[in-house]
Image: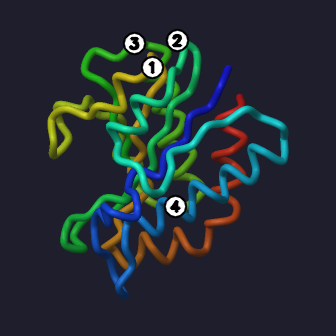
Amino acid sequence: MFVYLSAGHSLQDTGAAGINGRMENQETIKLRNAILYCLRAKGIPVQTDNDNESLAQYLARIQPGAQDKVIELHFDCANGAASGTTAYVKNGAGKQCMEYARLLVNTVSQVLGIPDRGVKPESESGRHYLALVHASAMAVILEVCFIDNAGDMQAYDAGFERLSVLLAAFLTA
């Protein structure tokens, strides 16, 4: 098994803007790097995106196998009106991927104490097609929490270290 870990937004694509000027790309890079540190400390083989490459460049560079885990980190945004964590998988994802995504969302929900918004097919995302979820049978896009919700971000900040460690452990299970 090999782990592919993506920050979801590069330095050229800021993603969503949140409370107190926080930007999605900065938060996803920070979380990815913390998880990466934990994985490398355990000697787990992991490949990440480059902060200066596009999603297309990343997808062209990686070659995940059927059992490899592919995770892309994101933060959701809904004008401060929503709370919780969500995962997206490809339409018609297999049972193993769905269970993996459910456990991932449940872990984030429990660690941060925010709502579990469930696992959704890519067709229910704002874009309706998410290229990364087609990279592997075990590919998940994780919306950690809402970057524009003060309560979510407070929970995220308070639980950041524990979340990083548990996500790293989750990716190696």
Q: Amino acid at mark 4?
A: Ile
Question: How far apart are labels 4 and 3 at the CA level?
Answer: 29 Å
Within-10-Å neighbours for mark 3: few <14, some 14–19, many 20+:
few
What residue would you read off at disc 2? 66
Q: In the rendered image of this protein, does residue 44 appear above or below residue 126?
A: above
Left or right, 154 with reference to 163: left
Secondary structure under tag 2 reads loop
Left or right, 21 with reference to 30: left
Q: Tell me the quarter of the picture where residue 144 sits.
A: bottom left
Left or right, 101 with reference to 164: left
Within-10-Å neighbours for mark 2: few <14, some 14–19, many 20+:
few
Asked if disc 2 and disc 4 are in contact, CB closer than 8 Å, the reply is no
Question: How far apart are labels 4 and 1 at the CA level?
Answer: 22 Å
Name the residue rendered at 69%, 44% in the picture: 168
- Mark in front: 3 vs 1: 1
Name the disc covering residue 94, or none: 3
Q: Earlier in the sequence, mark 3 or mark 1?
A: 3
Outermost residue toward the bottom in this view: 20
Q: Amino acid at mark 3?
A: Gly
What residue would you read off at disc 4? 29
Q: Earlier in the sequence, mark 4 or mark 3?
A: 4
Q: Position of residue 81 (x, y in %)?
A: 21, 70
Q: Quadrant of the N terminus?
A: top right
Q: Tell me the quarter of the picture where residue 76 sits.
A: bottom left
Question: How far apart are labels 2 and 4 at the CA level?
Answer: 26 Å
Q: Position of residue 51 (x, y in %)?
A: 48, 56
Name the disc covering residue 122, or none: none
Secondary structure under tag 4 reads helix
Asked if disc 4 and disc 1 are in contact, CB closer than 8 Å, the reply is no
